[in-house]
Amino acid sequence: MSQSLAFDLPMLTRADGSPALCLVTGATGYIGGRLIRELLLRGYRVRVLARHASRLKDHEWFNQVEIVDGDATSEEVLAQALTGIDVAYYLLHSLMSKNDFEAEESAMAESFARLAKAAKVRRLIYLGGMVDQRQQSLSAHLQSRAEVGEVLRASGVPTIELRAGVVIGSGSASFEMLRYLTERLPIMTTPKWVETRIQPIAIRDVLRYLVGAAALPESVSGDYDIGGPNIYTYRDMMQQYAMSAGLRKRIIIPIPLLTPKLSSGWVGLVTPVPFTLAKRLVASLKNEVVARNDDIRRLIPDPEGGLTEFPRAVQLALKKIKEANVETSWSNATFPGAPSDPLPTDPDWAGGSLYTDVREVLSDNPIDVIWARAESIGGDNGYSTATWAWRLRGIADKFLGGAGLRRGRRDPNHLMEGESLDFWRVEAIERPTAASPTGLLRLRAEMVMPGLAWLEWAIDKTETGQTRVIQRAVYAPKGLLGHAYWWSVWPMHGFVFPSMVKYVATGQR
């Protein structure tokens, strides 16, 4: 491990001199996964609350933390997670919930605040959104962020609410939106929010503030804006990004009549950010996000060399992307209501029908070579000679409001359980070893469809020494429309599935 970004800042300890115990919620999210690493580097003890703890096993810090497996909407789980905690980081949100996300966020915050007080937590730290209450009309996203902060600060527990605007870092939803818009559209017509002033901040500086806030005196409590050293319009940010990425200057033509709904659809189609999230992020861009003051910089001093300039933050993010070193991403976070049903074995689960497509191929290739092909499938690597069919399905999914294929892969060769892969979620990974020469990779579909679907590869050795690859697609329809969907796409299976299993088993496209 490298040195912590906040190594030069004070550290909170207990009365006996031992390191404080910190609870990190939202561990599968973009900020949470990185914060855990930073806290451990600084010397803190860490407890993690995760809805699906098994999805954390591939992180380097997995064996260094305590884990409470459960949902933050359960008060029983929260009470268990908060017991004995000194500092609790609140990094929960419901932005991907399609219905009343504001009510969900408020209810979670109220439970967390009350139980933190009962558990005698010494400090709450919350990462919210930068808001200016003087603005007449806040977006639903920013209004909810502000209300969650009010609930936590009213808990009776000393609370630091850090309010950030656009976070610049590899894997950040805001950064991915900026990146794809700039890279894919050298000429673009844009809504009037491209003229909104924004004070972006690098992810490394956000993490420094989060870690540094733990050791602030208990007398310090309140909300603090955190921003980087540069203030731009969104138009400026796109041009600065283009310059940092070595692209030509973008031609940007603002169209004031382009409504937030239309521009959300435009963002959803061009970028990997799904429509539900794009709609809420775009709605927030009408609000100026510039720090009201620099009070936080007097409490938590700048690092040597100062805060990260925007061009430098972009370069650092692009370097991580180029080197396939993106450790966490917005798309890997789980959210309430996301499909998480296990692969069903009982046909009654699907109302009496469970459709499967099973293909088996024997190969003379070594099992480790075959496994490497299976684990590298998707993203820029494609799927097989029928990758075109998946691309068509990805385009259709984007038009239906789904993720499409643009989420891509975090790493071109290696997967982690729980992360996103195009419009799939990695549900299970069992890598072959010398002691156990069998492997399993299972993906769960997150594309828009009237049912649930899985795709898996099981790999083992036969008695004759060959490697066997069994590819299985499973579909559990919901309602009559679900059955109709299966039969409508069934003709494509003859193109897609044989070429996929052939590629995994033999490497031939």
Image (cartoon, rainbow, N blue to C red):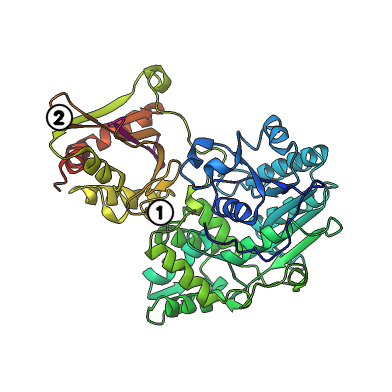
Task: Name the amino acid, label 1.
Answer: Arg
Specify whether 169 is left or right of 84.
left
For the residue pair 119 and 103, the one nearer the viewer reads as 119
Q: Is residue 392 magenta?
A: no
Specify whether 319 is left or right of 106.
left
Residue density around tag 2, few if under 14, some if 14–19, many if 20 or more, within 10 Å:
few
The Cα–Cα distance between marks 2 and 1, rounded to whole angstroms, is: 34 Å
At x 69% / y 43%, what residue is drawn?
103
In the rendering, at what x and y percent does residue 410 appear? Answer: 40, 54
Q: Quadrant of residue 359?
A: top left
Question: Callout 2: helix, strand or loop?
Answer: loop
How many labels, in total?
Answer: 2
User: In this figure, which residue is indicated by the disc labeled 2?
Assistant: 465
Residue interval drawn in magenta = 435-450
For the residue pair 337 and 352, the one nearer the viewer reads as 337
Q: Earlier in the sequence, mark 2 or mark 1?
A: 1
Specify whether 189 is left or right of 307.
left
In the rendering, at what x and y percent does residue 21 appear? Answer: 71, 45
User: In this figure, which residue is indicated by the disc labeled 1?
Assistant: 410
Discs 2/1, front: 2
Q: Quadrant of residue 217?
A: bottom right
Q: Quadrant of residue 230?
A: bottom right
Please, is residue 219 above or below residue 454 in the view?
below
Residue density around tag 1, few if under 14, some if 14–19, many if 20 or more, within 10 Å:
many
Question: Callout 1: helix, strand or loop?
Answer: loop
Please, is residue 255 above or below residue 419 in the view?
below
